[in-house]
Amino acid sequence: MGSLMGVFEEVVPLVPLAIGLSLSFGWDVFAGLGMSILAVGFGFSAAIANPFSVGTAQRIAGLPVLSGAGFRLVVFACVYALYLAFMVDYVKRLERRHGVPAVSPGSAAGRAGSAAAGAAASAVPSETAARKLHAGVRFFSRASVALALLVALSSVTRVGSDFVLPVIALGFLVIGAGAGLSAGVKPGKAARSFGAGALGVLPAGLLILMALSVKRIVVSGGIMDTVLFAASGLLADASRYGAASLMYAVVLGMNFFIGSASAKAFLLMPILAPLADLSGLPRQIAVQAFIFGDGFSNMLYPTNAVLLISLGLAGMSWGQWFRKTWKLQVATLAMTMGLLLVAVAIGYK
């Protein structure tokens, strides 16, 4: 979905479902995040026909929209193989840990699992309680899928696309309340649970506000213009291979401040495309460097709101996420840099 349709923030409603599925397999919260937000993030970054990165960048560069798809198919296959190897290795290591719980007891999911285990051990639910529980689960699952489809539709039609994250937040509030009532939870208990959950997500909200403030300071202070001017000077004097590598680095750096692929394309491609001409590079190379620099770091930078929201839903800190994914990020950087240099060598157009 990420590679073909540009789906990214639309996967947030499915994160809790993926985590629940992961825990039911005896895995942990990170495996659930890997099956959802990490998978979509890598697909978005190894784009084949992503309209928001590939399409926008190619239009601005004056190239036929979605041209050069053959090389991008090779890129997608390589990146997906790396991602799949990482996830399979992680899950196998989890399953080899005999006697070690897959979920950390100190995490939110671990505490919830311990509480559920204690409740199950103390009492067997009655048939009525089981029916109510199943009703709540059904409501949550169906409503979450409906919300995901609604948000995915907005990514295709672009109707209401500026309000995707607020709609997701409101949808989770309504879905949570509806699931609780469907399961027969008393309003007072549901309100207390909501308060406890809100406190758990609050640190992620503060980080998102801080991330937005960084972007505002950089743009309002003219820092970004200075950086782009200096980068353009370096690119003009570089060799073909050096220019392609510097383009990648410039986009990678700008992605820390601007998460939106379309916004970065409108800001950077009018600069990168002429610089590619000056360096003797096809403009398709500039587009590919933009695609690589735009995406993968979304799953690393603490300024990305979608990543922080997903981590907040999972009860995982950014530090824990970084420790588990930095090797994958380094391997991805090396692979994509190599693929970009191959594109330069073969004259990818």
Image: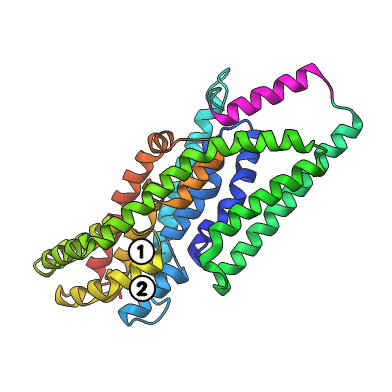
Q: Nearer the viewer, residue 130 or 165?
A: 165
| Sequence-wise first label, 1 or 2 | 2
Residue 298 visible in the shown view = yes
The residue at which mark 1 appears reads as: 291
Q: Residues within 10 Å of mark 1 (few under 14, many from 20)?
A: many
- Magenta region includes residue 122: yes
Seen in the image, is 199 located left or right of residue 299? right
- Indicate the quadrant where residue 182 lies: top right
**Residue shown at 54%/57% (left/top)?**
165
- The amino acid type, in three-letter code, at marker 2 is Ala
- Magenta region includes residue 167: no
The residue at which mark 2 appears reads as: 57
Q: From what the image shows, is residue 330 above or below residue 161?
A: above
Q: Secondary structure at mark 2?
A: helix
From the top left corner, tell me how far across and down residue 275 is, in percent.
18, 73
The quadrant in which the N terminus is found is bottom right
